[in-house]
Amino acid sequence: MTATGPDRVPGPEPEGFAFEERPRLLEGVRAYGLIVAMWVRSTMTYRASFVMTTLGNLAATAFDFVAILLMFTHVDALGGYTLPEIALLYGVSATAFGLTDLLLGSVDRLGRRVRDGTLDTLLVRPVPVLAQVAADRFALRRAGRIIQGLAVLGYALLTLDIAWTPLKVVMLPLMVVTGAAVFGAVFVGGAAFQFVAQDASEVQSSFTYGGTTLLQYPPTIFAKDLVRGVTFVVPLAFVSWLPALYVLGREYPLDLPQWVAFLPPVVAAGCWALAGLAWRAGLRAYRSTGS
């Protein structure tokens, strides 16, 4: 804290105290941006390596859609959905998850930091811990997943015969952004769980990486109990299924009303509120390893 009253030394504030003059959220965003910029500069030092790893990441994620293409060499529809319709589900889910993985993918390393005690070094810095954890080792190569998702989404939009309305046009970018927000809340909530479990990155991945794979296929091919789980428990259905079915003019699973397609922003806000509470609870419960 800066000194006040007669004990305060006249003159400009030390540079290290700049964070104290900003609201907590802006402080975290600024810190996140500075750390990300540092890692991006480091990555760009070896540009050829960056290009090759990005292309490799793009190619690796593309195999998911190649598997779908192979399925459609033997069938005309999957669960009653055509290839372009599934491409829309795939493109929205992959792009939304790619954005989250790029911006927050590093939080799955939190369990490792808890185990080896390196989290302690983040706690003593005048920067929000979540911003440091999320920006740590920022991997720009993950943009390959976003590029691949956008490419599939573009294919879907070019081949689908959609009766476009202003509301559907707005819905398209909105579900990518809110979908990324829902995935982000799952990432942060999973990281908070690692304060307790310490080695739960695979559990977290089952909801994040596993969740995006689930959403790449139509809900009609899954059991109703699973669809209920990703609608009412971990609301991943609001990432792509429900808003995309509105764009496609398809019936909703579980006989849900049509207006649920417009709930993703509300669901995303609620998920972040819960994730924030879980994160603060986990951080307060953290006890150093003593190493």
Image: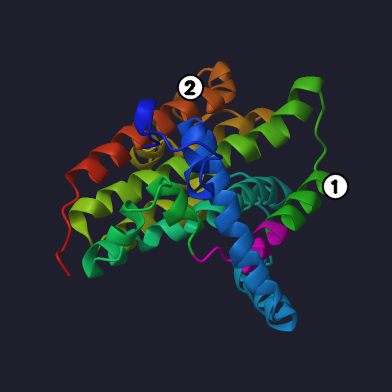
> Does the residue at mark 1 contact the one at mark 2 (Cβ under 8 Å)?
no
Asked whether the viewer can see residue 151, the reply is yes
For the residues labelled 1 and 2, the Cα–Cα distance comes to 29 Å
Say if 220 sits above or below 133 in the image.
Answer: above
Q: Is residue 197 above or below residue 249?
A: below
Q: Looking at the rendering, in which quadrant would you find the C terminus?
A: bottom left
Q: Position of residue 124 (x, y in %)?
A: 32, 53
Q: Is residue 199 above or below residue 167?
A: below
The kind of secondary structure element at disc 1 is: helix
- Disc marking residue 158: 1
**How was this image coloured?**
rainbow
Q: For the magenta stretch, what is the residue range?
A: 137-148
Q: Residue at x 30, y 47 (%)?
A: 192
At x 82%, y 28%, the residue is 163
Q: Which corner quadrant of the image does residue 199 belong to?
A: bottom left
Relative to residue 69, is residue 53 depicted above or below? below
Where residue 144 appears, as percent x and y from the top left, is 67, 65
| Residue 54 picture quarter | bottom right
Q: Secondary structure at mark 2?
A: loop
The secondary structure that most of the magenta stretch takes on is: helix
- Residue 67 lies, in percent from the top left, at 60, 68
Badge 2 is on which residue? 256
The amino acid type of the residue labelled 1 equals Leu
- Say if the magenta span includes residue 143: yes
Q: Along the horizontal axis of the image, is 110 left or right of 31?
A: left
Amino acid at circle 2: Leu
* Residue at 22 percent of width and 66 percent of height: 115
Picture coordinates of residue 138, whole percent (x, y): 55, 63
